Structure formats: structure tokens, C-alpha cells
Image: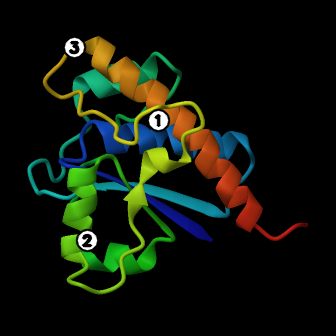
Amino acid sequence: MIRVLFVCLGNICRSPMAEGLFRDLVVRRGLGEVVHVDSAGTHDYHIGEPPDARARLAMAGHGIDIGGLAGRQVTAADLRDFDYVLAMDRSNLENLQRLAGGGPCAARLFLEFAREAKTREVPDPYYGGPEGFERVYALLEDAAHGLLADIERRLPRT
């Protein structure tokens, strides 16, 4: 089992969007039994809350339902247990590195897997309108395909 964790600040916009999009991609590729997908936030602002309504609406527009997800805070155990810990921006990457407490931390920026994006940070759409969530979706989709290709290279050939 390959475990993937997407991380943003509060786990109500970017990371649940990434979780829903990537899970959908994994399932459509027939890898749902070998790739586990989750998301979390570096802060405890929205523990137990559903994704932001604008995030749910943007994802629904692409045929993906993230309404059943609930915010949670990332833990030090997550840093050990997940094969991919993917931060949405440098600030959250630094938060993850602090959480590791000087120990090994394999966290990296999700957009390192992007094929087309010129940026390496997914902007936080929280204080904007629907267009920000659509921009986030496009960036996440680009990186999701690159990430899936990386994972598929790691899987044993059958």
C-alpha cells in the first residue's frame, strides 16, 4: 500500500480538494486497493468540519464529491506513516519540518509533480471567490497526474 497525504493550513480548501481529485484519479486508474489517500491541516482551526462550501462546489463542477471529508490536524505519526507527505505551499512545508522536530521529514511541495505549472505553491483560495478555487483545481489536477505517474513507476509490474 502506498500512502499519500495532502497538507494545507486548515484542511478545508486545498488539501481536501487534492484528496478528492487524487482519490478519483487513483480509482479510475484501478489503483484504489493499493493507494491510500488522505489530507490534513497543519493547524487545528477546522478539525471535524467539512470542506469549505466553495471547495465542495468547485469539485462538484468536476464530478467529484468531497462533502464527506472532515478536517483533521496532521500528526508526527503521519510523517512516518505516509510515503508521500505533500504540502500545498512553503509555509506548510516549514510547519511539517518543525513537526518532524529535526528528525527525517520527507515532506515536499505537491506542485513539484506538476508538469505545466510555473509555480511551486498552490495559492490559498480561502479569501477569494470561485475563480480562485478553479485555479487551485487546475494546479492540483496538473500535479496529480505527475504524482500518479511517479507512484505507478514504484508499483511492482504484474
Tell me the mark number nearer the camera, choosing from 2 and 1.
2
Q: CA distance from mark 3 to mark 1?
A: 17 Å
How far apart are the two marked residues, 2 and 3, measured between alpha carbons?
Answer: 31 Å
**What residue sits 32% from the left and 38% below the top?**
14
Check residue 97 in the rendering and tell me which mark sits there, or answer none. 2
Q: Is residue 15 visible?
A: yes
Q: Which mark is residue 28?
A: none
Q: Earlier in the sequence, mark 2 or mark 1?
A: 2
Mark 3 belongs to which amino acid? Gly
User: In the picture provided, is 67 more to the left or to the right than 10?
Assistant: right
Up/down of 112 relative to 36, above or below: above
| x and y percentages locating residue 63 in the rendered image | 53, 22
Is 8 situated left or right of 141 in this image?
Answer: left
Quarter where residue 128 is shown: top left
**Which mark, by number, is residue 140?**
1
Residue 2 image point, x, y percent: 60, 68
Give whichever of discs 3 and 1 has the lower sequence position. Answer: 3
Q: Which residue does the numbered mark 3 point to in the structure image?
A: 129
Residue 23 image-quadrant placement: top right
Q: Nearer the viewer, residue 62 or 14?
A: 14
Q: How far apart are the two marked residues, 2 and 1, measured between alpha carbons? A: 22 Å
Nearer the observer, disc 2 or disc 3? 2
Residue 64 percent location from the top left of the image: 50, 29
Quadrant in the picture for residue 28: top right
How busy is the neighbourhood of tag 2: few (under 14 within 10 Å), some, or many (20 plus)? some
* Residue 75 position (above or below residue 48): below
Residue located 24% across and 84% down the image: 102
Q: Are marks 3 and 1 in contact (CB under 8 Å)?
A: no
Quadrant of the rendering where the C terminus is positioned? bottom right
Q: Amino acid at mark 2?
A: Gln
Q: Look at the image and tell me whether residue 74 can be seen.
A: no
What is the three-letter code of the residue carrying label 1? Leu
